[in-house]
Image (tube, grey):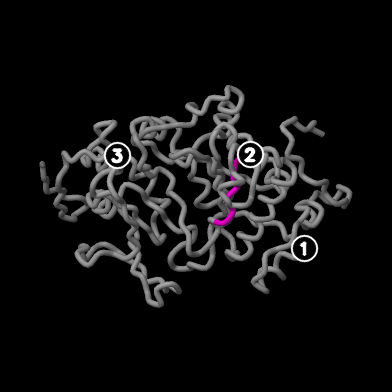
Amino acid sequence: MTDSAVDIQGRNLKLTNLEKVLYPAAGFTKKDVIDYYARIAPAIIPHLAGRALTRKRYPDGVEGEPFFEKNAPMHKPDWVKTAPIWSEGNQREVNYILANDLATLIWTSNLAAIELHPSLSLAKNIACPTMMVFDLDPGPPANIVQCSQVGIWLRQIFEHFGLQSFPKTSGSKGLQIYVPLNTPVTYDITKNFAHALARLLEHDHPELVVSDMKKQLRTGKVLVDWSQNDEHKTTISIYSLRAREHPTVSTPVQWKEVERALKKKDAGVLVFEAAQVIERVDKFGDLFAPVLKLKQKLPQLAGLEKAAASGKEAPGLDIAAQAEEPKRKPSAPKNKPARPRTATKKRRKV
């Protein structure tokens, strides 16, 4: 096996076992993993910086037994920054890695940390998520094509509230929809809001959507997983490799690409491997850049704060009917907004 000593931004690193094959079906080696993360670094680091990072390591490759690593290993270099965060489950502080720079990213890659799972909040304010996420998980025979339909319905609801949303592939079999917030909010609010939207979609489209995680309910349907909006959970990072048969990547996509996958009923339209993702970033830039800075506020839903304060689940909600009225121009009538429609038909412009 080949080892190599490198200098990255003044940090000395020893890279080991570079020829070890981590993706047997693709012949993708540890060197290839490190090379991918080095090339994608300008795009991925802004999405990792300052966030507690859970690494999923595959020392024996994607066909071997992986393990999640939250706490920084004892042998970490002194220059690797960490953030101590209290763990209720362990009743102690966990020192999470902060992948703030290229050297740290390459160091984690050398440990066969193929998958990177950051927090939805910054470590300095761990109780305040900067975004809300919906993980659309298809139950076979449903696939990412059906997820695309559900994602488009979600987008319609967000547009009703004047909110922008951004899609990305999970890099596995599903689609994920992100709503950037970057304004003061709590996980109680985002989680209850996400759950309410999941139930709304399930009510409107029971033939395709489920909000309950029971596996027996998910056959041929899309689970709208709202539960990821939790301080103690993480979601696969944008641009992270996935431990699949081939080196697929959780990839930002344009809504027109989601629409194309649905129209063609072709799941392959939304599958991207490492080399393709590098090319896409060269062509499009970082499609997820707005998620880092775009400031948006969730509409107030009747009963939501009360449910959050009591620790109880929010009641079934008619999302639009109980929402605060969107801001209008002074001349506009102050009527309650209509309930958001999640049908596939296009609404007439007025």
Residue 36, which numbered label? 3
Q: Residue furthest bottom?
A: 91
Question: Which badge, 3 or 2, comes first in the chain's sequence?
Answer: 3
Q: Secondary structure at mark 3?
A: helix
Q: Quadrant of the C terminus?
A: top right
Q: Secondary structure at mark 2?
A: helix
Q: Nearer the viewer, residue 9 or 4?
A: 4
Residue 150, which numbered label? 2
Could you tell me residue 268's position as x and y percent? 47, 27
Q: Amino acid at mark 1?
A: Ala
Could you tell me residue 131's position as x and y percent? 55, 55
Could you tell me residue 36's position as x and y percent? 29, 39
Question: Which badge, 3 or 1, comes first in the chain's sequence?
Answer: 3
133, above or below 87, in the image = above
- In the displayed structure image, the side of residue 337 where residue 293 appears, left or right: left
- Mark 3 burial class by Cα count in 10 Å: few <14, some 14-19, many 20+: many
339, above or below 84, in the image = above
- Mark 1 burial class by Cα count in 10 Å: few <14, some 14-19, many 20+: some
Q: Amino acid at mark 2?
A: Val
Kindly identify the residue that appears in the image at 35 percent across and 62 percent down: 70
Q: Which residues are magenta?
A: 221-227
Residue 302, which numbered label? 1
Alpha carbon of mark 3 to alpha carbon of mark 1: how far? 46 Å
Could you tell me residue 197's position as x and y percent? 68, 51
Kindly identify the residue that appears in the image at 60 percent across and 64 percent down: 185
